[in-house]
Amino acid sequence: MPQIDIVREARERLEAAWLQDRENREDAFTDLKFLAGDQWPAAVRQQREAQSRPCLTINRLPQFVHQVANSVRMNPPQIKAIPAGGEATEALAEIYSGLFRHIQYRSNATHVFAHAVHYAVACGIGHFRLATDYVDDNAFEQEILIRRIQHPLSVFWDPAAIEPSRADADYCLVSEMIGKKEFEARFPHAAATDFDTPSDGNAESGLFWANRDAVRVCEYWVKRPVVRTIARLARGETVDITEVDPAELPRLGIVATRKVRSHKVERYLLSGSEVLEGPNAWAGRYIPIFPVIGAETALETKTVRSGLIRAARDPQQLYNFWRSAAAEAIALAPRSPFLATPAMIAKFKAQWDTQNTVTRPYLLYEPDPDAPGSRPTREPPPGVPTALTQESAIAADEMKATTGIYDAALGARSNEISGVAIRARESQGGNAALHYQDNLMATLHHLGKALIDLVPKIYDSERTLRIMREDDSHDPVRINAAVMGVDGKPMLLNDLSQGIYDVRGRSGRLTPRAARKPPTRCSSSSAPYRRRRASPATSSRRTWTGRVRTKSLRG
């Protein structure tokens, strides 16, 4: 396809993605501003500041976001491969699982996942991605890494995609700002023109801001339809022979062949007028961008996406208003005057005139013979309306109600005494936000499928891998090594391209270092603790049944 057509296609698809998701993106941007402390309408703030009235922002929202997002850091999720058919074995599945853990370790994936969940909670969506890079500057071998996408609104998805993981998307665009000097160094012959803005794009929520010192480019991922030819061999294996030399086909022992409609993934980097990079073929069959979704509500003509902040915005604004009103009322309240006769203060009038502005350890007065036994006394101070404090408390409670996270989950002390009661109270907030953790696990399901598809294509040569065990130890494993089989024929040792594997994920890490919770009950204070076996119903593991075939030809 000509370059101009690629740019036009990407621009039209960006326009469609923007129009479909515009309301969600604008609301998400407002959510992020609220989380950052920008919680007063601009006109109201300007009016109050012009009148020298207090405009306080007491931001209570971050505690709710951190309460949910930090659970990922406390219980880092893991992906495990399990054999599902073909030539898959438990040994190869363990190599896959160890490699997954090593990829997560090398990528600091706990931070990446927590970053994505943070934005899913904050504004309804967060993202991360898969990438490949050379092991070091002196090697040809590549490795797979998991990397974060800093801004959640920089990604635009195919409007037709409905899966939470967006695995069914046909395209995806990622907007990025590059400094002009860096742009000129990377693309010396390219014109420094920004990628086009949608016709009604919002300059903030769409990330289409102008910057004289930077150029906006767009990463364009797209699935292109292809037709592949697969063959069944006499030994029962199924291989892709689309790109095999026809002269090699007779010696494979082909029993049957058929055409398969499939796709390939291509990547382009575009400026406003040309293709800067691409088409670059991605080794995997999945677009390597992964969203973590907050809550989605399907309506008749649209889907509303939101996070934890959305429903708490109004209570937070009310809280700011009532706290500002209380501060204003207290500041403007007149100081309580003293009641005294002229004779009492005449000799010390200078002290009494400045008693509200100068701090003194004592005030002198002269007894008045006309008022024997009396002295200057202060009137009771005017009271602050109790409605202000009551409304502030109501607004604070409404923030807890709209987020589903109450005092016990936030660390406040309660009346519960037993461990069972305390954990039951704490679990209330966890259950209210459980769908964020569940949506992350759904995305990791898709990530696991993508890794099983990608690993044999990146780790395709003879090499030694470091795999990570569940106890955090590392072991070297040789893969794709040519050895002599028991039948005297050459074979590949630990060939990762063979077999069918499922993926299973769990939240939390089960290692010997994991802290053990004390039992919830015992027969008496002196009785020994009894360990209880966890039933399958209470297990934190979750199994996915999606099957992924990874086949490649081994001559």
Image: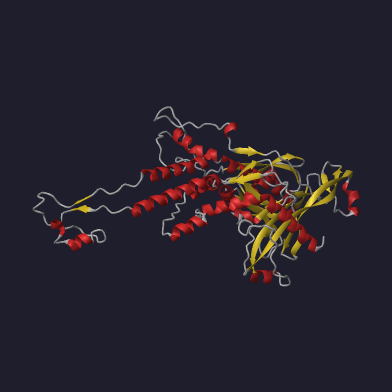
Q: Is residue 455 left or right of residue 474?
A: right
The answer to whether 1 is drawn above or below residue 226 in the figure is: below
Residue 152 appears in the rendering: yes
Outermost residue, left side: 369
**Quadrant that contains the N terminus:** bottom right
Q: Position of residue 196 (x, y in %)?
A: 70, 62
**Residue nearer the viewer, 543 or 272:** 272
**Residue nearer the viewer, 523 or 408:** 408
Q: Position of residue 540 (x, y in %)?
A: 58, 38
Q: Is residue 237 left or right of residue 435?
A: right
Q: Position of residue 215 (x, y in %)?
A: 66, 66
Residue positioned 25% across, 48% down in the render? 380
Residue positioned 15% across, 54% down in the render? 341
User: What colouring style does the render use?
Assistant: secondary structure
Residue 109 appears in the rendering: no
Q: Position of residue 223 (x, y in %)?
A: 77, 52
- Report how many numbered discs are placed on residues in the image: 0
Q: Is residue 410 left or right of residue 380?
A: right
**Residue nearer the viewer, 436 or 392:** 392
Residue positioned 47% across, 34% down in the render? 519
**Residue nearer the viewer, 247 or 257:** 257
Residue positioned 87% across, 48% down in the render? 252
The answer to whether 366 is drawn above or below residue 89 in the figure is: below
